[in-house]
Image: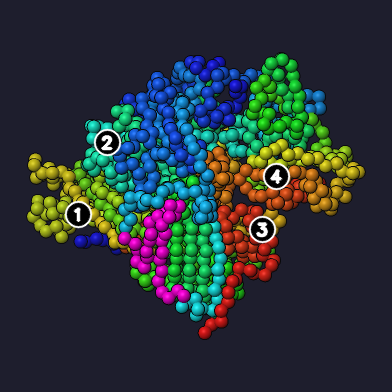
Amino acid sequence: MNIRTNTLTQVGQSIPDVDSRAKLTGSARYTSDIVIDEMLHAKVLRSPHPHALIRSVDVSRALAMPGVAAVVTGDDLTALDFTYGMFIRDQPVLAKDKVRYVGEPIAAVAASTEELAWRALAEIRVDYDVLAPVSSIAAALDERAPMLFGDELHASALPPPPPNSTWTQEPSPNILFDFNHGFGDVDGWFQRCHHVFEDRFTIGRQSHCALEPHVSLARFVADHAVEVWSNNQDPFLLRQDIARIFRLKLDDVRFHAGLVGGGFGSKSYCKIEPIAVLLARKARRAIRLALTMSESMMTVCDHGAEIWLRSGVSASGETLVREAVVNLDGGAYADASPSVAMRIGTRFNGPYRWRAVRSRVRVVRTTTIPAGSFRGFGAGHVTWACESQMDMIARRLGRDPYAIRADNFVRLGTAGAPGESVLDSDLMEGLQTVGERVGYKSKERVPKRGIGFAVAVKGGGGSHRADARVRVWASGAVSLAAGVTEIGQSTRTVLTQIAAEVLNIDPDRVAVEDIDTDTTPFDSGTHASNGATVAGLAVREAAEKARVRILEFAGGILQCTSAELDFCNFQVRRGENRYLLADLVAQRGPGVDTMFAGEASVQTGSGSFFWMPVWTAVEVEVDAETGAFKILRLINATDAGRAINPQRCVSQIEGAAVQGLGQALFENLAYCEAQPLNATPLKYRLPRISDVPHQFETIILEQGHGPGAYGVKGLGESGNLTIPAAIANAIADAVGARVTDLPITPDRVLKALGVASKPNTNVTRTVEAN
Amino acid sequence: MIHAGGIDLANRMKRGAVPEHVVTLGQIPDLCGIQEIGGRIEIGAATRHWEIENDPMLRCRLPMVAGYIAGLGNIRIRMQGTIGGNIMAGEPGYEMLPLLAVLGADLVFADWSTGGQEITAAREWVLPRASSSKTLLLTSIRIPLRPITVAWNRELRPALGLVASLEWSGDRVLHGAAAVIGDHRGPMVREHHFTEALPAADAAPRAANIAEVWADKFPDIDVLVGPDRDYCRHVLSVMLRRVLHTMLKT
Amino acid sequence: MTTRDRLTIRLTVNGEAHTVEISSNLMLVDLVRERLNLQGTRVACDQGACGACTVLVDGRPITACLSFAFTADGAAVLTIEGVAGSDNTLDTVQLAFHDSGVPQCGFCTPGMVLLAKAYYMQQPMPEGADVERWLDANICRCSGYQVFRRALHSTPPREDAP
């Protein structure tokens, strides 16, 4: 196929987002704006207890209220395959017999107004047998801990383990998943290495807080056929879930997805959709179930975690061997936890070369909000521990943290671990870029100020299928259909630019269709930063096919081979001659289709299709009296391979960085005895503009090694991963205080400062080299 | 339910509360506005934060009060929320009451049931009473005009903050009051009487000592989501010293 | 009044006069979105924390999810639909946001536009640091806020402040 890459006109242009005007003038429409005639409003009754048996649910008073059309409870699930979860299906659509966290849905009401639905909830009587909560990882692992589930395994659809890995599903009721991974002679290398360092790190749980809360609308168009609108980034996966749960045929379930008001992981996989469908079926009416943001915060969050790292290095600081043990707080239900555990377990080599690595990741069940996917899919957890420890090792050895990183980087074109795809970025270039920008080597040291670095590499795009269809009308319009959900990452813009590039047209001529699973080409889900790369390949190929069809058609009329022709601005060009496509079609007369379509499908293999690196340099100033610190400079760089739209890349990375900043400084869903303390937007602190340093720079490298169209690769999940570790490293550089718990609050810094004056007690073992 | 700014009422109604009556006060002229009457400033309870921070008279007479309020909440809250709402909401993290406490301000209530008036010192006003109060209607806030300096520290916001005042006689410090800001179970105001009226020049070098003694008068602070008591106690004395330095310099 | 009372209010929304019968507990955001069908105003946190529902009431940025509709009686309300010109030309703030690439998911965008617009209407002599103190009121979860700084750095002060 003839793909021009030398003279690009659309790729590389920072055009505004294709929906920019609509979003700025208020005409953009989201799922939360959809109004269906005669629809009912639904509200969900949630558990006030972290752990309790449900003895009875009495809905009679609610049902008797005028305007209340239907109430559903766990009893309505009996004939259904009523549990869901990404790989392990342990979460009931509504609590059945038992509740396992504060906020768990117990019943749902459909009424003529939202206010009435709220009031009807207050009339439902639930009789509980309160059980002891299991509020932390330690509590769940205690032998005397109450069990959240019985001994039986749940239905599951786990994929084969990644290379060098094994897993066990639900080895005990309070452990959802036990994942083991490793390569090389770990024990042997620990014997042979010069220094061994063991450190422990913890991470609080972050809440996604996308601004548009979860919303689903559902209506049955026949007894056995349902139509659903949901602001979820997995419409095709959801179609499968709803068909399975309600025992419907796949083609009798139809999902729509339009613009989504942010997700960051909270809107992937099945969430509230089955409740809306259940109510629609019972009420025989259209249902709108819109959560409040507080409810969204209680629907899913990121994993709290504790991580032990034991790392062995040579006398000079060569990274040799590592062992990692991780306990993830998975909350009450699986959601995407097994997948997150696998991503974490396979990433402890990070951006460095190791001879041997072994890891064990357990997902522990607690009576808290179910943890699921969050931007980075666990790569942030790994990076917090590994990049903090990399600095700690350097300082213990008296080595420069910058240099020890540079010495150990995985090189471009080599694999970081056996069985992994080769690295498609030059890590040294990125480190040099942020190092120079922050003035690491040139700056004079100022008391209480320090500079910290962190580097991470996250895989993306694997095991993904993306289909696309491009239709070119002779009249001068192009219609692009792909199953990637527009969630604020500008996927519609980037795909538009790729189609416009291939077709040699103005991007204004391209309209991107909203997603409708009945008509939109398949996509396995908007994940792993794959939109621009995988769907981008499909769009390029589909557009190219449409272009070829146009040229073949024109060649037939102009009586030449299509190789002599070119297509530009809806004109066919042959040498100096130009023919409007519309004229050629008209010339041919009736019976000729005025539309030229191309379709394509791209399937990536398992493992990473591309690698997203991120390099961060942070300068801080620490108030040694209070432990408060100020971020003076934040420099973040990533590699887009090729930036289709540099401005949109910068937006993604800046936004990710500030999410990382929030995680580093204050974001944490806190519990007291299994009661959430701040799972509400009034109490949960999110970054504001005043939290963001003025000296905040984002650099998009274009190293050109990406596997996507024009060398592109995804980057959306990279920008947040390194921020917390870079800040902790900068604080250590400034005042010698090492914080190993997230968030890095002033009291933790102050406590660490107290420790800093004492001899380093973290070094557990030093072994002489053989 | 009596409704002025309405921010907190609306939040409560969304959680399912359905008040029988709503009485709207925002448009009653007597409850709005700022005046100087006989050695004190009187602020109507329905006056918005934004009006207070931009009032020319107040900016002249109590410039630090305007400055403190300008850093409160955010612009939407200051343009919509009223001083009375801030006090009566009963939210421990709200920042108006600590300021009024160190200013020696009084809260003036109309008693709904008797038709009389009740005056309570801001520092005596107990938050739980605020949210459960059924018959008292806050009508105004009285701030005495005394030779006073005010300073605050919000570096550790939202976990913890401090606002303090010093009262002067000429260039001598007579006494001070300090109040803790933050999401804890307040109120938390402690005074410090200087044994002899100290000239500022003599007080400044002793600020650290004074701050330590002063901070010791505070009970333990339990922040809802945040640092432990030991940390709070430690930084309280640091913040006190810092605000003392600021006040003694001016 | 009791919360079951119906009352009639008169207000202008985006320059257009309306007389509406409402219940006393109707929120301004619901009046705008559901009764007047102006869906550009977003409901996000619904607790006044995020500012996605910001509208201007007599020029003041107001949290519409926390304001009773009756408080807008007699007021001039500006929602995002009224910001662009009648021929859909973007106003100064919108244009600056457009050129700098502000909208990502776009859910905070209308509130941010109105907040910035209120600032330029209020401040005859705008200063960069000051507009940031205003923007601090609203949450954007997608961007790193730098894009707002870039956008407003380029926005000239509005001369047509009322």
Q: First in sequence: mark 2 or mark 3?
A: 2
Whole-percent x, y for residue A694 in the image: 57, 52
- What residue is at 29 percent from the left and 28 percent from the top? A284
Whole-percent x, y for residue A254 in the image: 26, 39
Whole-percent x, y for residue A98 in the image: 43, 40
SS at mark 1?
A: helix
Residue C147 visible from this viewpoint? no
How many numbered marks are there? 4
Q: First in sequence: mark 1 or mark 3?
A: 1
What range is drawn magenta here? A160-187
Gap between marks 2 and 3, in whole Å? 57 Å
Horizontal side of B216 relative to A603 (left or right) equals: right
The lab-note entry on whether marks 2 and 3 share a chain reads yes
Q: Is residue A160 above or below residue A581?
A: below
The quadrant in which the N terminus of chain A is found is: bottom left
The residue that mark 3 highlights is A751
Chain ID at mark 1 = A
Quadrant assignment, res A516? top left
The lab-note entry on whether marks 2 and 1 share a chain reads yes
Verify whether residue A744 appears in magenta.
no
- What residue is at 79 percent from the left and 47 percent from the top? B216
